[in-house]
Image (cartoon, grey):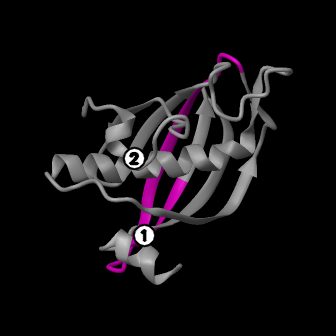
Amino acid sequence: MLNVAMSELIAHTEPMILIDRLVAFDTDTAHCQVTITPKSAFYDSNNARVPSYIGSEYMAQAIAAYAGAHDITSKREVKIGFLLGSRKLRCYHPWFVDGDVLDVFVEKLIQDESGLSVFNCQIKRGDICMVEAKINVFQPADPMNFIKENQ
């Protein structure tokens, strides 16, 4: 287990770090958690909930945590990546509610030399699948040069 803050694993700062912790990771998978509280980003305080479509960002950040964990354990600098989009996003429940502990599971399906990857992702509350999707991400060899070239 890698015991580091999420801010060391992903290229976000508060308040846009949406997931709480990396539970486990291995060669092709990661498991992260987020607990829904009134301090959660996108929290609707009138109804004590977060829309489940925000789960796509939870999944993207879990992928970033997976990549960051591999970078740290390989003694490489943690690089930024880009969420390209999702396919087959299915929200089985419209909301994550106050107190929900969500398990975010990501599994690498494809990774090519260009930095393009596809992950199969699920968010579960206990045994209940709340959201699932295939997430496409891109991590170029030189992210800052990529940004400059694409402005």
Q: Does the magenta stretch include residue 8?
A: no
Question: What percent of the width, then of the height, locates residue 53?
Answer: 73, 46
> Which residue is rendered at x = 39% and y = 68% of the image?
139
Give the crowd class for mark 2: few <14, some 14-19, many >=20 residues within 10 Å: many
On screen, residue 5 above or below 150: above
Dividing the picture into quadrants, the one containing residue 115 is bottom left
> Which residue is rendered at x = 78% and y = 33% of the image?
95
On screen, residue 115 above or below 36: below
Question: What percent of the width, then of the height, locates residue 146?
Answer: 41, 77
Q: Is residue 92 left or right of residue 3?
A: right
Chain part drawn in magenta: 98-120
Q: Which of marks 1 and 2 is in front?
A: 2
Question: What percent of the width, then of the height, locates residue 140?
Answer: 37, 73
Residue under numbered circle 1: 110
Residue farthest top in this picture: 99
> Which residue is rendered at x = 36% and y = 80% of the image?
114
SS label for mark 1: strand
> Which residue is rendered at x = 39% and y = 44% of the image?
30
Q: Is residue 19 left or right of residue 129?
A: left
Three-letter residue code for mark 2:
Ile
Three-letter residue code for mark 1:
Ile
On screen, residue 150 above or below 51: below
SS label for mark 2: loop
Residue under numbered circle 2: 10
